[in-house]
Amino acid sequence: MDTQTRILEQIAPYQPWLTLGGVLVLFMLLRVTRKALRYRVDEIGYWLLGARGRLIWFWINAPGVMLHELSHAAVVLLFTPFGFRVTSITLFRVRPTVVRDNIGRVMRNGGRQSLQLGEVQYVRPQGRFMSYVGDGLSGIAPLFGGIIMFAFLYWIATGYNLWDIPLDPHTGLRLLRPDWPWWTLIFAPYLILTVTSELWPSRQDWTGARWFMIGLSVLVLLILGLLWYTQHLGQVIALSAFIAARVDFALIVLIAFDIVFLLIAELTVRGLRR
């Protein structure tokens, strides 16, 4: 038995946990690369437009912002039978975020002014269980809307479904499905960048979804405890590791896109510095 085979056998019992942990590690790495890309785009903006240059990043991500707000609105519309009603939708408009105190007065922000890119306002009955559920699902809706759109754009770009890892035993990794048009790579990576940049719910979204998320977390912990008690937890972990492997691959794809855009931005910045 060679050394590589022996190492693989030693790792095998921990493989599901390593795959699950890879989601967290790759997600953190994606945050780092995306933050570095924004820093480079901001620098390009300062060279070209001065103080208004920071707006370039937001205008680049306009399609992602629109999807973010439409995801909020779609969930509100789904909860129309429970008394939810959309009162206004702003898909994209860059403006300073208005911060209010507990009694509704506008507060002055002495630090760096944050910007609001879009907004969905709605009304719903107070104090009902389904109101909290609707608030929670609406708050985290951009996460699901962004994932669905990312999967769709990945298929447009490569011809592969996101859950089909394109590894060929003879030729290795295939970027495009055979006979798939290459010109889809001209626009799809940009749209993937914008969608995933605005995929994560904002702080205000998480605040509105806090009670739903607390209840969901408690429910998940109870289910895991029940599965452990009935000795079915191992099967769930195996299934979770299978799903996590696809998530890991998706995150690797996003990081690869970020690296390509980072190289382009870095070359642009160096050109402007000369």
Image (cartoon, rainbow, N blue to C red):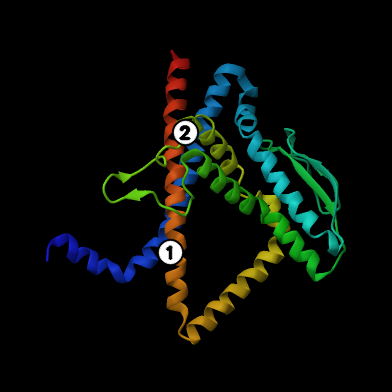
Please give the residue where the numbered disc 2 appears in the rendered image.
181
Q: Is residue 18 left or right of residue 203?
A: left
Q: How many marks?
A: 2
Tell me where residue 181 appears, x and y as whole percent: 47, 33
Taking 59 as reference, is 196 above or below it?
Answer: below
Q: Residue at x 55, y 42 (%)?
A: 153
Q: Residue furthest top?
A: 274
Q: Residue at x 47, y 67 (%)?
A: 240
Tell me where residue 2 appears, x and y as whole percent: 12, 62
Circle 1 SS class: helix
Taking 242 as reference, is 224 above or below it?
Answer: below
Q: Nearer the viewer, residue 205 or 247?
A: 247
Mark nearer the N terminus (1 vs 2):
2
Q: Amino acid at mark 1?
A: Phe
Location of residue 140 (image quadrant): bottom right
**Label 2 neighbour load within 10 Å: few <14, some 14-19, many 20+:** few
Taking 242 as reference, is 180 above or below it?
Answer: above
Q: For the residues carrying marks 1 and 2, which lies nearer the camera in this image?
A: 2
Please give the residue where the numbered disc 1 appears in the rendered image.
242
Circle 2 SS class: loop
**Label 1 neighbour load within 10 Å: few <14, some 14-19, many 20+:** some
